[in-house]
């Protein structure tokens, strides 16, 4: 083969490889959450959080979220689902879980994003449960134990549906339904012991993939999670003699106080 043909063949191979990479990078996934309150679409960040998206899509493609329940709502913070279904009466039935997926806390927990809940707030413990950020939760969710993984965002006018769910009244039927949003159900019903049924719950009838072949994420610009990139402060400041000085006590007391104040808000547990 002549030198010219060799160079041409090499150039062709390079072009084909570049096209292949471009097509792979362009692929993104859009899923639609179909609920009794309305439908909304979520654009997943396939390229930024591939393991988390793959884990989530496994549940989607196996129908695990079909007829599942929004079991938690905390206005000004999150709504949460992906963990339970309802079979005629309480308690809720747990969705079978796969092995946990490693955390990918690359992106910030801002309003409109979807993230993974964790078991007992442990890193690398996410399975099936997810949450939708109702507000900018970077201060509470981007940093603890490595930060919560954001893997997509609600697009178009989907947050109108999410906000409508968050505006529903909340009731306490014991964990995991101790902050459950209900429709057509009142405090009087609760006081009189009226049982809830499917008509009261926020049910996700299905989650389906609507787009997996185009560059659907091209126009998105998700902010990065910068909290996990910063080096944490030392647990104490040594004084001469090698022991922890008074700064350590103040620091630890401050950390404990912040933890107590944020505990009811900052965790998104399964």
Image: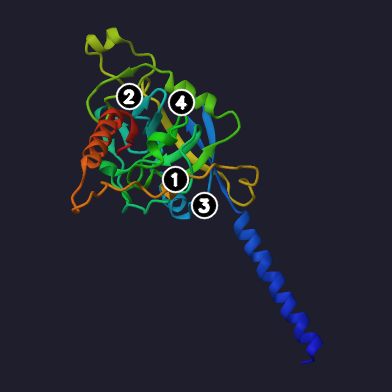
Indicate the secondary structure of the residue bearing disc 4: loop
Nearer the camera: disc 3 or disc 1:
3
Tell me the tag on residue 48: 3
Q: Which quarter of the rendered picture does the N terminus lie within? A: bottom right
Query: In percent of the image, x 48 and y 54: which residue is there?
Result: 50
Spatial separation of the CA atoms under disc 4 and disc 1: 18 Å
Mark 3, other Cα within 10 Å: few <14 / some 14–19 / many ≥20 = some
The residue that disc 2 covers is 180
Spatial separation of the CA atoms under disc 2 and disc 1: 22 Å
Q: Earlier in the sequence, mark 4 or mark 2?
A: 4
Nearer the camera: disc 3 or disc 2:
3
Q: Earlier in the sequence, mark 4 or mark 1?
A: 4
Q: How is the image coloured?
A: rainbow
Residue 125 or residue 89, whichever sits in front: 125
Would residue 100 appear left or right of 204 to someone viewing this image? left
Residue 182 or residue 105, whichever sits in front: 105
Q: Quadrant of residue 80?
A: top left
Q: Earlier in the sequence, mark 3 or mark 1?
A: 3
Q: Earlier in the sequence, mark 2 or mark 1?
A: 1
Q: Measured from the top left, where is residue 101 in percent x and y?
A: 36, 53
The residue that disc 4 covers is 36
The residue that disc 1 covers is 60
Nearer the camera: disc 2 or disc 1:
2
Mark 2, other Cα within 10 Å: few <14 / some 14–19 / many ≥20 = many
Indicate the secondary structure of the residue bearing disc 3: loop
As drawn, the residue found furthest toward the bottom would be 1
Tell me the tag on residue 185: none
Would residue 154 appear left or right of 54 to someone viewing this image? right
212 to 201, vertically: above or below: below
Spatial separation of the CA atoms under disc 3 and disc 4: 31 Å
Mark 1, other Cα within 10 Å: few <14 / some 14–19 / many ≥20 = some
Q: Quadrant of residue 184?
A: top left
């Amino acid at each position: 083969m002549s030198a010219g043909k060799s160079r041409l063949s090499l150039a062709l191979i390079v072009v084909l490889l570049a096209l292949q990479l471009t097509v792979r990078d362009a692929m993104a996934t859009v899923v639609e959450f179909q609920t009794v309150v309305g439908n909304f679409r979520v654009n997943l960040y396939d390229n930024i959080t591939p393991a988390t998206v793959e884990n989530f899509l496994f549940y989607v493609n196996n129908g695990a979220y079909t007829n599942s329940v929004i079991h938690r709502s905390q206005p000004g913070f999150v709504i949460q689902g992906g963990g339970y279904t309802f079979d005629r009466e309480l308690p809720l039935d747990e969705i079978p879980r796969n092995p946990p997926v490693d955390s990918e806390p690359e992106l910030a927990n801002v309003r409109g994003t979807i993230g993974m809940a964790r078991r007992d707030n442990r890193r690398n413990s996410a399975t099936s449960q997810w949450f939708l950020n109702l507000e900018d939760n970077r201060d509470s969710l981007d940093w603890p134990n490595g930060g919560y993984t954001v893997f997509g965002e609600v697009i178009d006018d989907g947050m109108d549906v999410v906000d409508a769910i968050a505006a529903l009244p909340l009731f306490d039927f014991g964990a995991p339904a101790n902050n459950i949003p209900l429709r057509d159900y009142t405090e009087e019903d609760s006081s009189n012991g009226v049982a809830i049924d499917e008509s009261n719950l926020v049910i996700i009838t299905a989650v389906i993939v609507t787009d997996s072949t185009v560059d659907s994420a091209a126009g998105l610009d998700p902010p990065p999670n910068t909290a996990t990139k910063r080096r944490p402060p030392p647990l104490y400041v040594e004084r001469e003699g090698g022991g922890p000085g008074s700064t350590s006590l103040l620091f630890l007391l401050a950390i404990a106080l912040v933890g107590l104040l944020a505990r009811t808000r900052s965790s998104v547990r399964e």
